[in-house]
Amino acid sequence: MDQNELKKALLWAEKEAKLREDMARETIGGLHEQVQGEAGRYRIAAGCMWAVLEELDRWIPVAERLPDEYQGVLCIVDGQPAKNITLKGAYQIGEWDGCGGWIIEEWPEWEDAKVSWWRPLPGPPERGDGA
């Protein structure tokens, strides 16, 4: 599930929770508690989806974890990819190769790129009527 799908599911869960909360106000007795419980479960699901979205939308230190192998990510890179070129805190597209280290798209021959942070690339834009 990508970020756009997750956002849609989150909005759906929040809408369903609101709908059930409204329904609970109009019911009585045991049915009220049942509908209120359903609303609570949708709220919990929405909260879990928010947590996943926040995880997907942050910079991750390489000391914390590495991306899946060969997954294209946005990296913050330091080092010298070529003679007379030094990068410091440069934004680059890269992939983690468990055997050979980081592969930086713009500098594929660079063997000792020092990546400090990375984050998943965003998904493609949603196509509207004008696209």
Image: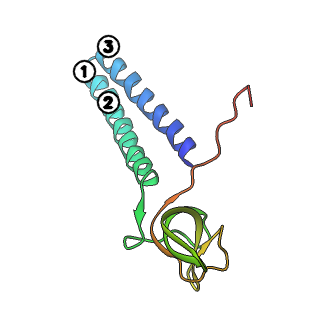
Q: Distance between the Cα atoms at labels 3 and 1?
A: 11 Å
Residue 11 image point, x, y percent: 47, 32
For marks 2 and 3, give the CA distance: 12 Å
On the rendered structure, is 54 left or right of 37?
right
> Distance between the Cα atoms at labels 2 and 1?
9 Å
Vertical placement of residue 14 versus 25, above or below: below
Residue carrying label 3: 26
User: Badge 1 is on which residue?
Assistant: 29
Left-right relation of 37 to 114: left
Give the residue at mark 2: 34
The quadrant in which residue 19 appears is top left
24 relative to 77, above or below = above
Classify mark 2: helix, strand or loop. Answer: helix
Number of numbered markers: 3
| SS for callout 1 | helix
As helix, strand or loop, the secondary structure at mark 3 comes to helix
Q: Give residue 94's position: percent from left, percent from top.
A: 59, 67
Residue lying farthest front? Answer: 84
- Label ID, residue 95: none
- Viewer-side residue, 13 vs 65: 65
Q: Which residue is pictured at 40% across the width and 49% down the height?
A: 54
What amino acid type should be assigned to the residue bearing mark 2? Gln
Q: Is the residue marked by circle 3 packed among few (<14), some (14-19), or many (20+) residues within 10 Å?
A: few
Q: Residue 114: x and y, percent?
A: 48, 76
Quadrant of residue 95 within the rendered picture: bottom right
* Quadrant, the C terminus: top right
- Three-letter amino acid code at the position of disc 1: Gly
Image point 67% across, 80% down: which residue?
Answer: 109
User: Tag 3: residue type?
Assistant: Glu
